[in-house]
Image (cartoon, rainbow, N blue to C red):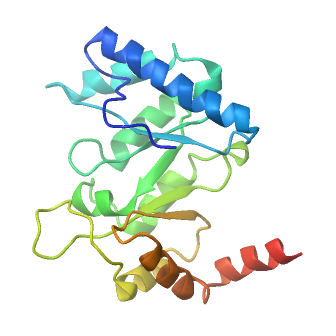
Amino acid sequence: MHPDQFTLINSVDNEVFQRSVKELRYHADVLDLLGVPGSAKIQIHVGGVYGDKKKSIQRFIQRYEKIDTSIKERLVIENDDKQYTLQDCYTIHKETGIPIVFDFFHHELNNSGEKLCKAFEIFTKTWDRKDGIPMVDYSHQKRGRLPGTHTETINLSRFKTFLDATKPFDFDIMLEIKDKEKSALMAVEIASQDNRFKKIHAHASN
């Protein structure tokens, strides 16, 4: 689940924080009522910078400690395209244990110089067994549009290159492509040639 951009744990406004906790509690309650395990996650961004990234990161960490355990068990953070890099998220993880969802497109736009394989080494280690399989958001730039604009249709050549570059790692992929099912079906066709996909399919058939 992915609450909207107004869910801000590290807001300088305490009322915004309190409303954000209510929003997160709602999402956690829905997942609890569905009876799904803790591997069903609630994904958020770190939040705003508010003129001081270090203080904003510390504020996130301090606020996180005040959140209900039922929310903590499901909460994950993702790197974004302008403010918080994978390394920033990892700083938060080291203090809180919160897993990181790796956004591939955001990492292309905003990073600390890590190559893709190194980025995967970092984020996959933030997931414990109880958290399930590490998750990746995948998209790429739409040609001729402002940086950060998601593509309309998946570029299959780029997607195959991405899969080839990440072969040492096992992860789930969430496509953030505008034409949705159309690209998803094409992506599955490419992924079906990957041994990691074949292993999951064989397990599901047994």
Compared to 204, does 55 lie above or below? above
Most distant residue in the top direction: 14
Out of 171 and 155, give the one closest to the viewer. Answer: 155
Vertical placement of residue 193 versus 64, above or below: below
**Location of residue 17 with respect to 42 vertically, above or below:** above
Nearer to the camera, 90 or 10: 10
User: In this view of the protein, can residue 73 be seen by the observer?
Assistant: no
Total numbered circles: 0
Viewport quadrant of the C terminus = bottom right
Q: Residue at x 23, y 29 (%)?
A: 53
Does residue 63 show up?
yes
Instruction: Residue at 33%, 27% (x, y): give it.
Output: 57
The percent position of residue 145, horizontal first and vertical second, equals 11, 68
Q: Is residue 56 left or right of residue 145?
A: right
Quarter of the image for residue 172 reads bottom right
* Quadrant in the picture for residue 128: top right
Image point (56%, 33%), residue name: 97
Task: Give residue 152's position: percent from left, percent from top.
Answer: 28, 73
- Estimate the x, y position of residue 33 in percent, counting from the top left: 72, 32
Q: Residue at x 41, y 84 (%)?
A: 161
Residue in the foreground of this view, choosing between 144 and 26: 26
Residue 159, image x, y percentages: 41, 80
Q: Is residue 123 left or right of residue 147?
A: right
